[in-house]
C-alpha cells in the first residue's frame, strides 16, 4: 500500500512554510512513479521555494515491491536511542506485524512469505542501494542479454 500525505513544512533556513508531499510508504507495484522520485533523490526531500534550502524530512518509510517480492523498512537513526523502538521487533530483528497483516499473509499463502522478511535500514541511501541491488539481481537472474542500466557507467 502506498501512503502519502500533504504536510506544511517550515524551512529551517528562512522559516517560510510551504506544503509538500511526504511518503510514509511506497508500493512501487501500485505506484511506479514514486520509484522515480526515490531514484532521483526527491522522495521526502524538502526544497524551499523561497530560499532554495534543501534537506531530507527524516520520517519512517516503507518501500514495497510486490513483483520482486521484497520490502524495506527505513527508520531514522535516532530511533536506535529509543527503548520503546525495540519493542516493535522480534528477537530475530524482524518487525512484529499487526495481527491483521499476519492473517493476510496466511490467506495469500506461499507467494507472500517474503512479507515476513523485511530489510531494516537506518539510512535512506541504503534504501536506494538495496533497491538497486534487488533490481540488478532480478535482471541478471532473468537471463536478460543486456546489462542493467544501473551497471552502465
Image: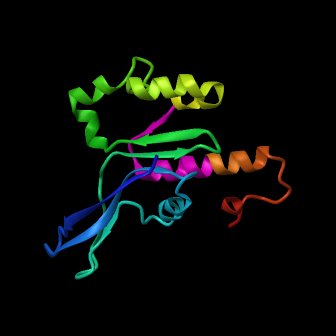
- Look at 13% across and 72% down and name the residue there: 15
- In this picture, residue 116 sits left or right of residue 11: right
Q: Would you place residue 36 above or below residue 112 in this image?
A: below
Q: Position of residue 148 (x, y in %)?
A: 73, 58
- In this picture, residue 37 sits left or right of residue 49: right
Magenta residues (range): 117-133
- Look at 60% across and 52% down and name the residue there: 132
Q: Nearer the viewer, residue 2 or 125?
A: 2
- Look at 23% across and 34% down and name the residue there: 81
* Image quarter in which the C terminus is found: bottom right
**Numbered marks: total:** 0
On whether residue 121 falls in the magenta region, the answer is yes
Q: Position of residue 110 (x, y in %)?
A: 65, 25
Q: Is residue 74 visible?
A: yes
Q: Nearer the viewer, residue 2 or 81?
A: 2
Residue at the limit of the structure toward the front, as seen here: 107
**Where, by quadrant of the figure, is residue 90 drawn?**
top left
Q: Is residue 55 visible?
A: no
Residue at the limit of the structure toward the bottom, as seen here: 50
On whether residue 27 falls in the magenta region, the answer is no
Q: Would you place residue 107 above or below residue 61 in this image?
A: above
Q: Position of residue 21 (x, y in %)?
A: 33, 63
Q: How is the image coloured?
A: rainbow
Residue at the limit of the structure toward the left, as seen here: 15
Q: Would you place residue 18 above or below residue 71 in this image?
A: below
Q: Position of residue 8 (x, y in %)?
A: 21, 65
- Look at 66% across and 60% down and name the residue there: 150
Q: Nearer the viewer, residue 62 or 2?
A: 2
Amino acid at each position: 500500500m502506498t501512503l502519502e500525505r500533504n504536510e506544511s513544512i517550515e524551512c529551517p533556513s528562512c522559516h517560510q512554510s510551504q506544503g509538500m508531499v511526504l511518503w510514509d510508504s511506497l508500493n512501487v507495484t501500485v505506484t511506479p512513479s514514486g520509484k522515480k522520485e526515490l531514484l532521483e533523490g526527491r522522495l521526502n526531500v524538502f526544497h524551499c521555494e523561497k530560499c532554495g534550502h534543501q534537506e531530507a524530512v527524516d520520517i519512517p518509510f516503507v518501500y514495497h515491491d510486490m513483483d520482486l517480492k521484497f520490502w524495506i523498512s527505513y527508520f531514522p537513526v535516532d530511533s536506535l536511542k529509543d527503548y520503546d523502538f525495540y519493542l516493535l521487533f522480534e528477537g530475530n530483528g524482524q518487525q512484529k506485524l499487526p495481527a491483521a497483516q499476519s492473517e493476510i499473509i496466511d490467506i495469500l499463502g506461499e507467494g507472500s512469505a517474503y512479507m515476513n522478511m523485511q530489510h531494516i535500514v537506518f539510512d535512506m541511501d541504503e534504501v536506494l542501494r538495496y533497491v538497486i541491488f534487488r533490481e540488478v539481481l532480478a535482471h541478471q537472474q532473468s537471463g536478460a542479454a543486456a546489462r542493467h542500466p544501473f551497471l552502465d557507467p
